Image (spheres, grey):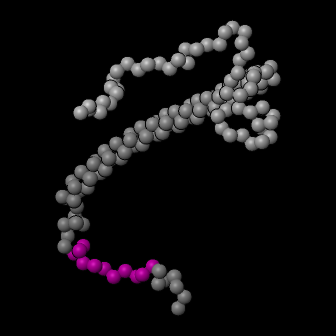
């Protein structure tokens, strides 16, 4: 019996005969304007999918490319401006962050200093040492004094 033989995927492939083909010089050039289906009006106007290039088409291409180039420049400029603005905002926030961190450091040092001063004061404060100071003294309610009777 003969075995079924599959083609080797790594074997060199033969090129189709049309690859590398070029029209001779002076031959009118044709190009595919689109592979998409067109409506009837555009089909009539353009003459179908294949049509010879005309000076009108060249002018249209040049105008479209120029318009595209200007739009691309505008887009790149806008993107650069946005990046610059973000960079400036980043630098401002970094500066603000640095200032706030410095302030946190100062306040932390002040808190430490005041806590130590309070501990030292508590050791010798006569008001804290006297047991009579811990008896609650009735005080008038400040809100009740303001209300009409």
Q: Residue at x 77, y 42 (%)?
A: 40
Using the image as rendered, state which of residue 92 and residue 119 is in the foreground. 92
**Residue 80 sits in quarter:** top right
Using the image as rendered, state which of residue 129 and residue 100 is in the foreground. 100
> In the rendered view, does 129 fall on the left or right side of 138?
left
| Extent of the magenta region | 132-142
Dominant SS in magenta: loop
- Residue 115 in the image, given as x and y percentages of width and height: 26, 53
* Count of picture labels: 0
Using the image as rendered, state which of residue 95 and residue 36 is in the foreground. 36
Magenta stretch holds residue 136? yes
Q: Residue at x 65, y 13 (%)?
A: 23
Against 112, residue 20 (above or below) is above
**Quarter the N terminus occupies:** top left
> In the rendered view, does 80 fall on the left or right side of 120?
right
Against 7, residue 95 (above or below) is below
Q: Residue at x 37, y 18 (%)?
A: 12
Residue at the extreme bottom of the image, as rendered: 149
Q: Residue at x 66, y 9 (%)?
A: 24
**Is residue 81 at all visible to an observer of this figure?**
no
**Is residue 33 at all visible to an observer of this figure?**
yes
- Residue 141 in the image, given as x and y percentages of width and height: 42, 81
> In the rendered view, does 108 fall on the left or right side of 78?
left
Residue at the extreme top of the image, as rendered: 25
Magenta stretch holds residue 80? no
**Residue 26 sits in quarter:** top right
- Residue 138 in the image, given as x and y percentages of width and height: 33, 82
Against 20, residue 70 (above or below) is below
> In the rendered view, does 8 fall on the left or right side of 141?
left
């Amino acid at each position: 019996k003969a075995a079924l033989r599959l083609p080797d995927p790594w074997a060199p492939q033969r090129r189709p005969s049309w690859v590398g083909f070029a029209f001779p010089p002076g031959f009118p050039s044709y190009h595919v304007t689109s592979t998409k289906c067109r409506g009837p009006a555009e089909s009539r106007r353009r003459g179908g999918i294949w049509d010879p290039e005309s000076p009108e088409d060249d002018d249209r291409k040049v105008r479209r490319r120029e318009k595209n180039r200007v739009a691309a420049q505008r887009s790149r400029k806008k993107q650069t401006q946005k990046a610059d603005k973000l960079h400036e905002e980043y630098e401002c926030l970094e500066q603000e962050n640095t200032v706030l961190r410095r302030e946190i450091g100062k306040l932390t040092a002040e808190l430490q200093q005041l806590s130590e001063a309070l501990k030292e004061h508590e050791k010798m404060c006569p008001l804290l040492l006297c047991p009579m100071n811990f008896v609650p003294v009735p005080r008038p309610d400040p809100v009740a004094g303001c209300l009409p009777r």
